[in-house]
Image: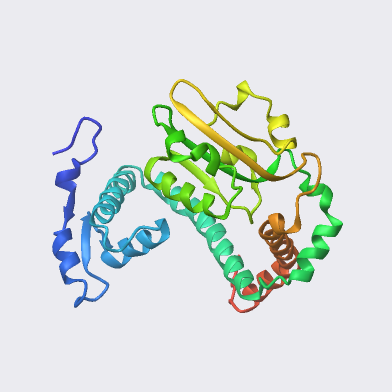
């Protein structure tokens, strides 16, 4: 029986072999268990797991496994229907798919070749040299700061717990007491006096538009304020100006990635033609015209 479009009904055209029993038998079976058929086309569990690996799915994910099988079946129905009814168009599709598969093959060959040859070790001196000669690339468009930030519900009596004094970090015990308080009551809390971080990443949920951000930062403000629902505490310990280059340690990871990306581009330019020529040389080509 066919539907109104002349395409076989999925349940009638597709034979899916007990997927869950396949999972149970994987440990002792070969990788060629057929899990689905559409006409004369077959899909094996090895094919399915190859696709799962490509998509980043866990091998034990039975839901994704079944989804891939059903998707393959749906696609194969259209392939076989076209092949049966319009063989010339089907032949054209097969010829065109050869070009696409060749592009993919070329991509994977180049990628694997570059992965082997690419040097990903970047020394501290290389990072420093790059930083010294490319500072214009790293001009800040926002403040970076070392800061403390605390957000709590407005209905809390924070003065009873000395939060309004502890957040100033004037005494050695203040931070420990504030950390303990934050674990119990904070909706957001950040403190790291050794790492630079963009200000807008720290206080992104603060109604800061009501206040002068420049003054808060440039004066290294220690302030707290409330809105209808929350109380916010901000302690700017140190900052770097906008429109200047940030410290080297703030950029080290970004610089390392830039150096490796540059190496990759150079390596690709230098090796692409050699790789293609080598592949052609190692594979016999016969043209009979």
Q: Nearer the viewer, residue 120 or 161?
A: 161
In percent of width and height, residue 10 lies at: 20, 43
Quadrant showing the C terminus: bottom right
Residue sitting at 50 percent across and 51 percent down?
96
Q: Is residue 187 left or right of residue 13?
A: right
Residue displayed at 20% across by 41% down: 8
Q: Nearer the viewer, residue 223 or 100?
A: 223
208 w.r.t. 266: above or below: above
> How far across and down, in percent of the image, does residue 247 sit?
75, 54
Of residues 249 and 43, the one nearer the viewer is: 249
Task: Please determine whether, in this image, residue 266 is positioned above or below residue 137.
Answer: below
* Location of residue 23 by image quarter: bottom left
Is residue 265 depicted above or below 241 in this figure? below
- Residue for point 16% across, 54% down: 15
Can residue 137 be seen here? The reply is yes
The residue shown at (76%, 50%) is 246
Q: Is residue 88 visible?
A: no
Place residue 26 in its image quadrant.
Answer: bottom left
């Amino acid at each position: 029986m066919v539907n109104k479009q002349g395409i076989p009904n999925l349940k009638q055209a597709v034979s899916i072999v007990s997927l869950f029993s396949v999972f149970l038998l994987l440990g002792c079976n070969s990788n060629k268990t057929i899990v689905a058929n559409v006409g004369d086309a077959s899909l094996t569990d090895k094919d399915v797991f190859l696709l799962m690996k490509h998509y980043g799915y866990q091998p034990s994910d039975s839901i994704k496994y079944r989804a891939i099988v059903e998707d393959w079946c749906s696609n194969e129905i259209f392939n076989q229907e076209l092949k049966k009814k319009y063989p010339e168009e089907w032949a054209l599709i097969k010829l065109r798919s050869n070009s696409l598969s060749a592009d993919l093959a070329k991509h994977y060959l180049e990628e694997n070749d570059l992965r082997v040859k690419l040097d990903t070790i970047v020394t501290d001196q290389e990072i420093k040299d790059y930083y010294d000669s490319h500072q214009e690339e790293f001009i800040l468009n926002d403040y970076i700061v070392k800061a403390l930030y605390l957000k709590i519900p407005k209905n809390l009596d924070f003065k009873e717990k000395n939060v309004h004094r502890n957040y100033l970090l004037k005494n050695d015990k203040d931070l420990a007491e504030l950390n303990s308080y934050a674990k119990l009551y904070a909706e957001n809390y950040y403190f790291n006096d050794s790492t630079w971080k963009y200000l807008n990443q720290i206080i992104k949920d603060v109604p800061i538009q009501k206040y002068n951000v420049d003054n808060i930062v440039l004066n290294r403000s220690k302030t707290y304020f409330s809105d209808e629902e929350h109380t916010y505490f901000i302690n700017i310990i140190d900052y770097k100006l906008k429109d200047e280059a940030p410290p080297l340690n703030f950029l080290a990871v970004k610089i390392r990635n830039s150096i490796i990306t540059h190496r990759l581009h150079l390596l690709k330019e230098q090796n692409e033609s050699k790789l293609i020529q080598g592949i052609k040389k190692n594979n016999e080509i016969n043209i009979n015209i």
